[in-house]
Image (cartoon, grey):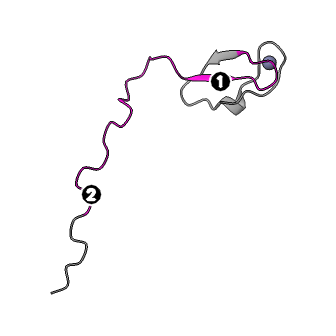
Amino acid sequence: MQGGGGQQGGDGGRGRMGGRGGGPGDYCVCPSCGARVPHQRGFPCYQRYCPKCGTKMTR
Ligand SMILES: [Zn+2]
């Protein structure tokens, strides 16, 4: 009689943020001067450099 925790998953949170690419909100921000550039997919912000001051971007 041991079937403890039989329910797994259920509604496993699908489409939490409505993942439809193309929307605004994905930006990398320069912590130094505040410049923003669109975040590229598969290209982390910390690998980008600010076009203005050359600081590594962050989110
Ligand atoms: Zn900058």
Residue labelled with disc 1: 28
The alpha-carbon separation of the residues under discs 2 and 1 comes to 34 Å
- Label 1 beta carbon less than 8 Å to ligand 1: no
Are the residues flagged by discs 2 and 1 in contact, CB closer than 8 Å?
Answer: no
The one nearer the camera, 53 or 40, is 53
* Comes first in the chain, label 2 or label 1: 2
Figure quadrant of residue 40: top right
Q: Main secondary structure of the magenta part?
A: loop
Residue labelled with disc 2: 9
Q: Residue 40 shows which numbered tag?
A: none
What span is colored magenta in the figure? Answer: 8-35
Q: Secondary structure at mark 1?
A: strand
Farthest residue in the right direction? 53
Say whether residue 22 is magenta: yes
Quadrant of the rendered image holding ligand 1? top right
The amino acid type, in three-letter code, at marker 1 is Cys
- Is the residue marked by circle 1 packed among few (<14), some (14-19), or many (20+) residues within 10 Å? many
Q: Secondary structure at mark 2?
A: loop
- Is the residue marked by circle 2 packed among few (<14), some (14-19), or many (20+) residues within 10 Å? few
Q: Position of residue 27 (x, y in %)?
A: 60, 21
The amino acid type, in three-letter code, at marker 2 is Gly
Q: Is residue 32 left or right of residue 2?
A: right
Q: Position of residue 10 (x, y in %)?
A: 22, 55
Picture residue at 24% right of the left edge, 50% below the top: 11
